[in-house]
Structures are given as C-alpha cells and as structure tokens.
Amino acid sequence: MKVTLVSRSGREIVKGGIELGDSATVADLQEAIHKRIKKHPSRQRLTLPVQPGSKEKPVVLNYKKSLNDYTSGNSETLTVQFKDLGPQVSYRTLFFFEYLGPLLLYPIFYYYPAVYKYFGYKDEHVIHHPVQTYAMYYWCFHYAKRILETFFVHRFSHATSPLSNVFRNCAYYWTFGCYIAYYVNHPLYTPVSDLQMKIGFGFGILCQVSNFYCHIILRNLRGPAGEGGYQIPRGFLFNIVTCANYTTEIYQWLGFNIATQTIAGYVFVAVATFIMTNWALAKHRRLKKLFDGKEGRPRYPRRWVILPPFL
C-alpha cells in the first residue's frame, strides 16, 4: 500500500509517498513517518482529509487499527493528512508537576510565617488556630492523593499532552495555591466557629473519599494500557450525573471553603466549577452522540451533567 502524506494545505510532505505492506497498521505508518521526517509518533496527528468547506470533523486514525480499515477495502493508495503537534509530555508528567506545586508551596505559608514580613506584616509571633492546621492537612492530603492517583489509579487513553500545557496548568495551580495559602495562613486571619469548621471539613473529607471511589470506577472502564475507548460509567453517583468525579471535586472544595471562609477560596472554586462544567458538558455531548442506540449500542441514559439540583 502506498500512503500519500499531506499537510493541511494539501502540500505533499514525503515526496513519492510511503510504501507499506498490505497488512500495515497505523502504528507502522507512524514509525515510517518518524524515520522519514524525524517526528516522534506522540507528535503526530493523522487524519483522513475532508472536503473543503465541509463542516464534518476529520476522522483521526487509531494507531491500533489497520490502514485497510480506512480505505474502501480494495484501494492500494491512501491519502493521510499530517499535523505536527509539537513537543509532548506524558499525562503523568503533566499532572505530577501541576499538583506538586500546591503541595509544596502551601505549607511554606503555614510553617514559615516570616514570609509575611515581605507583605508588610512585621509581628513574627504567630499562633495558628486549629482551622489553619486542619486546612493545611486537608490541602496536602488532597494534592498527595491526586499525585498518587496519577501514578497508581488513572489510566490514560491518550499517551501525551502538549508541553505548553505544563506551563499553563502549573501557572493555574501554583498561583491559586499561593493565593489561598496566603489568606488562610495570614497572622490576621479570623477563624470560623468550631461547628462550621467541623461541618466544612467533615463534608469535604466525605467528598474526597467519594471522589477517589469515582476515579476507581473510571479506572475499571479501561484496560492497563488505556484501551477501552469511551464507555458509559455506571454505579454510585454516576447513576445521577455524567461526571460524578467533577461533582465530588467541586463539593470537596466547597467543604474546604465552608471551613476556612476566604474570598480567595471561593474565587478558586468558582473558576474550577466553570472549567469542569465545560469539560462535563463536552463529555456529556460526546457520550450521548456515541451511545445513541444505533448499531446495537445502548442509549445513553438521561442524567444531570455535573450538578444535580438536590446536592
């Protein structure tokens, strides 16, 4: 089989095309491209060309499939559109660094109150209120949990992410980590009542445990290598909402904010809710489109997307 590799503008990238065996897979094509133009498979996005002006999304080639799956069955040639995704990193690397920052930066504001002298506070005699101590434990437990889940729980269908996402995500998590830590651990911080603190942290811990269980359910939908594709998650809160993992994530931060009561914390949960709601809406639409009852597939059940009205 001869594969013609073209850019988005239609320019031929490899002169004369690439010759492969009749039983070649997309992975074989990726390796051949790597040898010819020195672009690692993780940087390659291979799609079938679409007609100019078409509103249809291009079909992305699955590296596990045979190239014959993307032809009419008797064709000896195939045209593939190539896009260089740029430098990539594994998702585990991305998540590790974005979570490591908040885990290390937050305790600095708790254990080293001398940092506040750089913000105009001169008195170095600081006595921490219990809510500040519990908030530090709660915060560190959350991000330590996220890092451990990254390496021992999550299974990724896509192996890599653009390198630029490391800087963007680290800026988001690290900045908010310092922003919240500054106000919660400030020497002039005014604590909430003991009852409110217990309700907030108690509710938050319950949501953290629930979030972990949601991740276990999602993990079991995929094989060890991330195979399995999109599936309908079932059980526990997934019977109520499409993205129960996002629901529990939002509510665990709501519990933290009930216990600590800072504007910085509520700004963070508002931004996080906005971001996760957009992710949840996209996933909800994708699952409903995939599981529409056609071709023997089960119809996607009616669910709330992320926030049921009674929670």
Image (tube, helix red, strand yellow):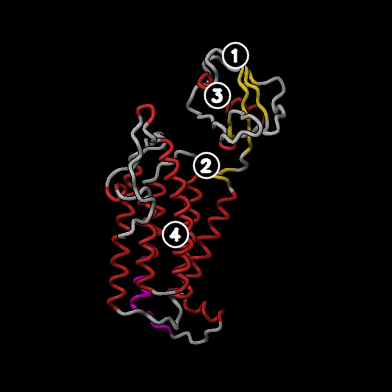
What's the distance in space between the residues labelled 2 and 4, CA to CA? 25 Å
Q: Is residue 21 magenta?
A: no
What's the distance in space between the residues labelled 1 and 4, CA to CA? 50 Å
- Reading the chain from its start, which is encountered first: label 2 or label 3? 3
Q: Position of 28 compared to 284: left or right? A: right
Q: Is residue 34 visible?
A: no
- Reading the chain from its start, which is encountered first: label 1 or label 4? 1
Between residues 239 and 26, which one lies in front from this camera angle? 239
SS label for mark 3 = helix
Segment colored magenta = 126-138
- Residue on which the image places disc 2: 160
- Reading the chain from its start, which is encountered first: label 4 or label 3? 3
SS label for mark 2 = strand
Q: Is residue 130 magenta?
A: yes
Q: Looking at the image, do the residues carrying marks 2 and 3 touch, with CB atoms under 8 Å apart? A: no
Front position among marks 4 and 3: 4
Q: Position of residue 299 (x, y in %)?
A: 35, 36
Neighbours of disc 4 within 10 Å: few (<14), some (14-19), many (20+): many
SS label for mark 4 = helix
Residue appearing at x 31%, y 80% in the figure: 193
- Residue on which the image places disc 4: 273
Q: Is residue 301 visible?
A: yes
What's the distance in space between the residues labelled 1 and 2, CA to CA? 32 Å
What's the distance in space between the residues labelled 1 and 3, CA to CA? 16 Å
